[in-house]
Image (cartoon, rainbow, N blue to C red):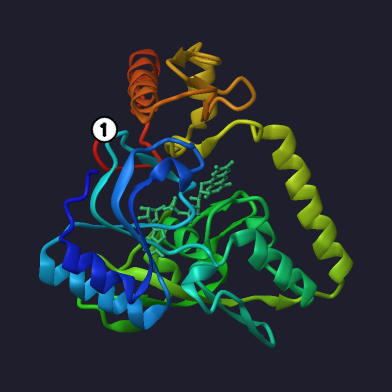
Amino acid sequence: MNVTVPHDVVRRLRALGVVKTDEPLSRHTTFKTGGPADVLVVPSGVVPLGEIVRICAESGLPRTVIGGGSNLLVGDRGIRGITVCVSTDAFGRAVPVVEGDIVEVPASVRKDDFVSICAEKGLSGMEFMAGIPGCIGGGIVMNAGTVDGNFVDILDRIEFVDVRGEVKHRDVTPSMARYRHLDMEEGAIVTAGRFRLRRADDDGAVRRRIRELLDERAKKHPLDYPSAGSVFKNPEGHSSWKLVNDAGLKGHRIGGAMVSELHTNFIVNAGGARSADIRELIEFIREKVYITFGVMLEPEVRLVGEF
Ligand SMILES: Cc1cc2nc3c(=O)[nH]c(=O)nc-3n(C[C@H](O)[C@H](O)[C@H](O)COP(=O)(O)OP(=O)(O)OC[C@H]3O[C@@H](n4cnc5c(N)ncnc54)[C@H](O)[C@@H]3O)c2cc1C
């Protein structure tokens, strides 16, 4: 056991959600890698989450937040302290509430579920999210998106728990967003988002567009392998996949980690990869692209825990 969290803290957490000790994070990441969380807690709601934040602060234990784990590279030695998982239905309230063209969504809802529910209700504007894995909370924090749109384009307001465990709201404005980033209070945990969509003139057209986007993704992305999507942000004026491709790295392997042959901005777990293999490959690519083109790639994937 790797647990550094005192028993009385674990006992208090058990009253506030589902708690697992020494939980392999490879079960919670789309790379299917990552060592154990000392303690993983899925809060049973927003108020319990506030209490969990207070317990972490009082006990001085480190706290890490994960959503669907689709943009994370977790170290092979895992995460010390308390990992708060804002994902799955255990979080509660996991159903979007639709009123006219306004949709309130708990952070734990999967993006695909959000897209389907909105399409069923005849709403439009969220189609770009089709096929982006993970949860709404992770999408908000990352300002996730594609060439068709980003979270900030339709996000109106967020609900979050601050570092003192208080529930707060904040209106979202375009100036708060950058490429794969939304400005938020330090240490905030997003618990819900309010989205402003449009009533579709033609529901069938919305469903067709979603289908088209899913088909395009299935052709362009190596979905048969575990990955975390695009590994690097696109530098100004460049496409990362092209830089990696033109540096001759298509199919390059370190251990079980491989640059995808289908999309060279994806690193895939080609079988038995450790997070250390993936991290080493990331560093190798950055060095090779820098030496070849003078461009330093910045990872989009977030590295957490001990490697
Ligand atoms: C096959 C594939 C395709 C992808 N395609 C795209 C794409 O087209 N566009 C795109 O933008 N991304 C894409 N991604 C990356 C990823 O799906 C998105 O970034 C996604 O929004 C991350 O959500 P998540 O819930 O998985 O967050 P996680 O990966 O769990 O976390 C990401 C970050 O957000 C923080 N976080 C998560 N939830 C919360 C919360 N509730 N409160 C505070 N902080 C939180 C975490 O601490 C971490 O720093 C892809 C990934 C895969 C595997």
The location of residue 74, given as percent across then percent down, is 35, 40
The location of residue 169, given as percent across then percent down, is 37, 83
The location of residue 116, given as percent across then percent down, is 73, 65
Rendered-image quadrant of the C terminus: top left
Residue at 19% of width from left, 67% of height from top? 9
Residue at 61% of width from left, 19% of height from top? 261
Task: Say if disc 1 is inside 8 Å of ligand 1.
Answer: no
State the SS at label 1: loop
Q: Is residue 173 left or right of residue 205?
A: left
The location of residue 266, given as percent across then percent down, is 53, 30
Q: Nearer the viewer, residue 213 or 91?
A: 91
Residue at 24% of width from left, 43% of height from top? 1
Q: Nearer the viewer, residue 171 or 292?
A: 171
The relative height of residue 158 versus residue 133 in the rendered view (above or below) is below
Say which quarter of the image contains residue 109: bottom right
Residue at 47% of width from left, 75% of height from top? 192
- Residue 126 visible in the picture: no
Per the image, the residue denoted by label 1 is 307
